[in-house]
Image: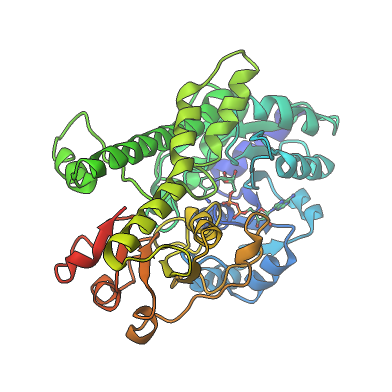
Amino acid sequence: MDEETAMAQFEDRLNDKTVRVGVIGLGYVGLPLVHVFWQAGLHTVGFDVDPGKIEKLAKGETYIKHFAADNVRVMNASGRFSATADFALLADVDAVLICVPTPLMGKREPDLTYVVATTEMIARHLHRDMLVVLESTTYPGTTTEVVQPILETSGLKIGSDVLLAFSPEREDPGSGYETRKIPKIVGGTDERSGSAAEKLYALAFAEVHRVRDTQTAEAVKITENIFRAVNIALVNELKVAYTKMGINVWDVIDAAKTKPFGFMPFYPGPGLGGHCIPIDPFYLSWRARQFDVETRFIELAGEVNQAMPQLVVDRLAGALTAHAGKTLKDADILVMGVAYKKNVDDLRESPALRIMELIKDAGGRVAFHDPYIPEILPTREHPSLRGMKSIAFDEATVSKFDAALITTDHGNVDYASLVSWSRLLVDTRNATKNVHRGRAKIVSA
Ligand SMILES: NC(=O)c1ccc[n+]([C@@H]2O[C@H](COP(=O)([O-])OP(=O)(O)OC[C@H]3O[C@@H](n4cnc5c(N)ncnc54)[C@H](O)[C@@H]3O)[C@@H](O)[C@H]2O)c1
């Protein structure tokens, strides 16, 4: 089949919506993404190297709190979705979207191991007229400098034989935003690739915004995350300054956001968490260094945000002394919420874990309650917390602690009861703002 015919067939499949979509990496991003294409009426295949996930999906179960098992069951029953660890099935899909992790290595350098392994796998099963889209967050240049050369080891050429694009994932787990309604950014390595990717996403997403190339699309995502990291650092710094002045930073932000222009609210907290904001900005710093550019805002924001857990623990220690004449040593502290943000079951990079370690380092005893996290499963970084289980949330349990510390403001916690049962409550999230009784026990941190 010549190249024009292959492309024409791909276009036909796009036009009559018979295009088959594969998603590699069925995590927080990939599973909702495959669902969006399935909802659009397309045939979908999910790929993952984790047999546990494939097994659960086959049984109609979910492993992501905000992705209902019902979705899985309905997808399975439709006959238009299957999940597999068999990458030979890539031969049956027309478009494949890569949603694998992009963490940092020890020295804050991009770790593209997962992207490289996945691309090598695709290269083995690449077929003419296939569209490959990288969705994982990464530095500008990854698609053309890392993914493209690996795909071309197949002997097929990008732009003529196969198509390649970047489309950043903009998922915000737990926020309630419907994935398909979040506008999709798309950039291709060439005109054909960009156009095919734009048409594919338009089948499933309410709005697609095409940019000139893959580098621009990569930069869009990283810019969004740097914007958040820098602004969160700014309000964290303001919180420290205002607290010393006796001013409540949340009252200030609530009032400032009444301005209909020129201000966007960001909220302070116990530090940054999650797979994106603490990590992605350093992808750009690393890349900028290759161009002899220093990204000082990013470094500064990193420093301010990383200092927050220690500041929270200092504030907790100060509050214990002021309210109970105690020090952290031998104190019993209940940490409320270990997920990195509200209403998610995701522990990655959570500042609560660092805070718990710091309390232990200071000689305190620590327990936690989190309605979304029953147990702290093994992670590389926090060996001393492994296996800890969420304890009960009732008066008898909570009142035994010298202090409770709110690190995550989950929506399903009864904060009025927490205040009434606690001897002292340190609130890093302003979660108790609507509780009127017992305010003397609350310290904002
Ligand atoms: N979680 C978020 O809120 C979010 C938001 C926007 C962007 N992102 C970006 O999306 C990407 C994926 O993040 P995530 O949160 O979904 O990660 P995740 O860890 O939840 O999921 C990744 C999945 O990829 C699988 N995987 C790893 N290597 C694989 C391979 N070689 N082949 C097939 N599957 C493989 C893992 O088993 C896992 O199921 C990252 O680049 C992240 O920065 C995440």
Q: Position of residue 341 (x, y in %)?
A: 42, 56
For the point 65% across and 17% down, which residue is it?
290
Judge whether 381 appears above or below 1 on screen. Answer: below
In this image, 225 relative to 399: left or right? right
For the point 20% across and 60% down, which residue is it?
433
Q: Quadrant of residue 130?
A: top right
Judge whether 370 appears above or below 430 on screen. Answer: below
For the point 18% across and 70% down, which residue is it?
438
Would you say residue 194 is visible in this rendering? Answer: no
Q: Which residue occupies the extreme front position in the image?
A: 325
Q: Position of residue 257 (x, y in %)?
A: 18, 40
In this image, 339 relative to 292: left or right? left
Please give the count of numbered marks on the rendered protein.
Answer: 0
Q: Position of residue 407 (x, y in %)?
A: 40, 59
In this image, 319 relative to 338: left or right? left
95 and 322: which one is in front? 322
Q: Which residue occupies the extreme bottom position in the image?
A: 396
Colour scheme used in the picture?
A: rainbow
Would you say residue 197 is visible in this rendering? Answer: yes
Query: If the image is split into quadrants, where does the N terminus sit?
Result: top right
Judge whether 426 appears above or below 244 on screen. Answer: below
For the point 34% across and 34% down, which residue is it?
234
Q: Position of residue 214 (x, y in %)?
A: 58, 26
249 and 64: which one is in front? 249
Judge whether 260 appears above or below 432 on screen. Answer: above
17 and 346: which one is in front? 346
In this image, 432 relative to 102: left or right? left
Q: Which residue occupies the extreme top position in the image?
A: 292
